[in-house]
Image (cartoon, rainbow, N blue to C red):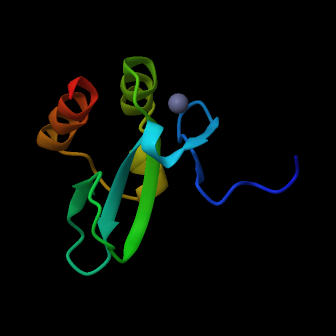
Amino acid sequence: MSRKNKFLRQCCFCRHYKNKNDLIRITKDYKTGELKLNNNQIIMGRSAYICKNEDCISNALKKRKIEISLKIKLTDSIKEKLYTVLKS
Ligand SMILES: [Zn+2]
């Protein structure tokens, strides 16, 4: 299977390809620099994806995978929101 399904996105920690619905999307708004989680609106900006599991989230935070990928600094409130999405 060389062609990637267009609905598949790669987790920034474990590097597995998963369906968009199984991942949390973190988008950096290209105008405001604001971070949005799992927003269904079309936002112009760079996105990082992460599996909806605690392992990937906590390791990605620890290893700063999201920060490196989006070239941003994650605030505590965004980190909290990640765990809130996980529990929802
Ligand atoms: Zn993952």
Between 32 and 7, the one nearer to me in the picture: 7
Which residue lies most toward the bottom here?
A: 31
Answer with left or right where residue 41 lies relative to residue 11: left
Q: Quadrant of the C terminus?
A: top left
Above or below, 53 against 42 in this view is above
Q: Position of residue 28 (x, y in %)?
A: 32, 64
Between 74 and 24, the one nearer to me in the picture: 24
Q: Position of residue 40 (x, y in %)?
A: 29, 62
Answer with left or right where residue 72 lies relative to residue 77: right
Which residue lies most toward the left here?
A: 77
Quarter of the view holding residue 5: bottom right
Residue at 25% in and 81% down: 31
Counting labels gives 0
Above or below, 14 against 68 in this view is above
Residue at 43% in and 32% down: 60
Q: Position of residue 63 (x, y in %)?
A: 45, 31
Between 17 and 80, the one nearer to me in the picture: 17
Residue at 23% in and 28% down: 83
Residue at 55% in and 43% down: 19
Quarter of the view holding residue 62: top left
Which residue lies most toward the right here?
A: 2
Above or below, 2 against 78 in this view is below
Answer with left or right where residue 81 lies relative to residue 70: left
